[in-house]
Image: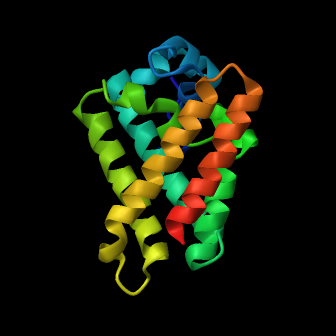
Amino acid sequence: MARYTKEHKQVTRQRIIERAGHRFKQDGIDGSGVSTLMSDAGLTNGAFYAHFESKDDLVANVVADQLRTQKESYGTLRPGREGLEDFVHEYLSPQHRDNPGDGCPSAALLDEIGRCGDGAKGAYTDGARGIVEELAARLAPEDPQSALGKAIGLFTMAVGTLQLSRALSDHEFSDKVLEQGIENALTFIR
């Protein structure tokens, strides 16, 4: 039997997490079985338990990874409120709406995370808190705590708007929801 290095195991684990993140956001947590997730990563079902205790453990790791990656991506935005405007335009774009597998885990998975165990909820809480703190720091760099409520409002407005736009079968109406969401969010952050 071949022995793999610790680095190989870490790379494989990260590949599983990344592929599962895409699949979860595309098909849902409940709609993604271990067999499919492992196939996506190019592995057999038997390899799953060498990396995770359970599917719940995988979900918690995926949620933490997805939100950490999302928060890190905000570093590419312009500083301050201008960066928030960029965030709003990117987040509430038709491209983001139409590609949930490549987008925000909150908009794609929030309802399912609410039904998950404490591990996934804890990972989500930590990740969402980090995102809200990042938004607050952009709203009020001199005193981010003072903007925490407004940052929560902005985050929930963006997530809810994107979720609603994805649920609509009328493409024109969905576009209007995104457009109005952008207008509302920009008014909110100014």
Q: Residue furthest left?
A: 118
Q: Looking at the picture, how far across and down is residue 135, in whole percent?
A: 46, 66
Q: Is residue 64 above or below residue 143?
A: above
Q: Is residue 74 above or below residue 119?
A: below
- Give me the residue at 39% from left, 87% from top: 142
Q: How many marks?
A: 0
Residue 57 image-quadrant placement: top left
137 or 121: nearer the eye?
137
50 or 31: nearer the eye?
31
Query: Does residue 35 appear to the left or right of 78 in the view shown?
Result: left
- Give me the residue at 74% from left, 40% from top: 94
Q: Looking at the picture, how far across and down is residue 125, in whole percent?
A: 31, 47
Residue 162 image-quadrant placement: top right
Query: Does residue 152 appear to the left or right of 183 in the view shown?
Result: left
- Give me the residue at 46% from left, 57% from top: 154
Q: Is residue 70 above or below residue 150?
A: above
Q: Is residue 136 above or below residue 7?
A: below
Residue 12 visible in the current orientation: no
Q: Looking at the picture, how far across and down is residue 98, in whole percent?
A: 72, 32
Q: Looking at the picture, how far across and down is residue 40, in whole percent?
A: 63, 23
21 or 34: nearer the eye?
21
Looking at the figure, which quarter contains the C terminus?
A: bottom right
Q: Residue furthest bottom?
A: 142
